Image (cartoon, rainbow, N blue to C red):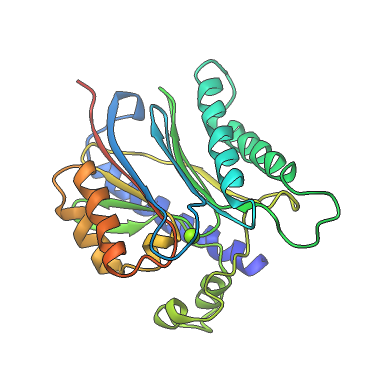
Amino acid sequence: MEQDTAARRELAGVVVDHLRGLAASGPATGAGLLDIRYAVATDGGLVRPSNQDAVHAGTGLLAVADGFGTRGAPASGAVIDSLRSLVADARTSAGHLLNLLHDAVLAANDAIATLTPSGATDVVAGSTLTAMVWTDRELALVHIGDSRAYLLREGEMFQITHDHTYVQAMVDEGRLTAAEATSHPQRALLLRALDGRSTPVPDVRLHEALPGDRYLLCSDGLSAVLSAEQIHRTTAAAADPETAVARLVALVRDAGAPDNVSCVVADVAPRR
Ligand code: MG
């Protein structure tokens, strides 16, 4: 866990430095001056008996939650509900967005705890969460688990979240290559998630969006099936978010869709 945390800090620092560098050369535009156009898609896939992903795109919130356990669907639903309440509160609260996000994640974890019968030894209900939240003043990214956020900026695609998985920790330690991680038998093992038990430790940070940015949030049913190159090419080629989400899900289904697949694509434009 400590190594995972250290690696995460390092990566977050690199990403923040990179984004600062780009921001310094780009237009000085704050989140309050931006409009976001988005589209969302979720699909149960071709193998799983039900869809335990939950996804939301709306004013102030883009979010993907991937539920697991026998009550995974209500778990991911509860996570999205907690975030939606936060966004409603954030517009009227003087509190700092990052603190509000931490509170929302704790509330989500408490909601998941209520789905688990007392005395249960297995995880009955759990979920990942990857979300972008913005108010008129700030935009923030909150992330726990192995769902992902990507940024397409000036033709380059960056994964801006760090997977909280066993295999990613092994890669960070140099004990596994990224290629080996994609086929590792324990690639789905999460080091961090919302499970209603332990106090969750999400990655939470402010983010500077720029006009022209395109964001992709997705569950592992997309990122574990498509290659980084496919994700980049498909996201970049689409004329609009609706086309992007439709093509991404179609590609996953063509590849057999072994898991539930969900994605949100959002374009940032100057406010008119
Ligand atoms: Mg999944």
Query: Residue at horizontal 54%, vertical 30%?
Result: 97
Q: Which of the two residues, 90 or 208, is positioned nearer the viewer here?
A: 90
Q: Which of the two residues, 214 or 96, is positioned nearer the viewer here?
A: 214
Is residue 14 placed above or below 60 in the rendered structure? below
**Is residue 251 shown to the viewer in this render?**
yes
- Residue 122 is situated, as x and y percent measured from the top left of the image, at 75, 62
Q: Which of the two residues, 3 or 220, is positioned nearer the viewer here?
A: 220
Identify the residue at the far right of this view: 119
Is residue 250 placed above or below 170 in the rendered structure? above
29 lies left or right of 137 = left
21 lies left or right of 207 = left
Is residue 256 placed above or below 234 in the rendered structure? below
- Residue 248 is situated, as x and y percent measured from the top left of the image, at 27, 56
- Residue 62 is situated, as x and y percent measured from the top left of the image, at 41, 38
166 lies left or right of 240 = right
25 lies left or right of 126 = left
Query: Residue at horizontal 43%, vertical 77%?
Result: 182
In terms of image quadrants, where is residue 135?
top left
- Residue 51 is situated, as x and y percent measured from the top left of the image, at 48, 52
**Is residue 139 shown to the viewer in this render?**
no
Query: Residue at horizontal 52%, vertical 22%?
Result: 88
Q: What is the quadrant of the C terminus in the image?
A: top left
Q: What is the quadrant of the N terminus in the image?
A: bottom right
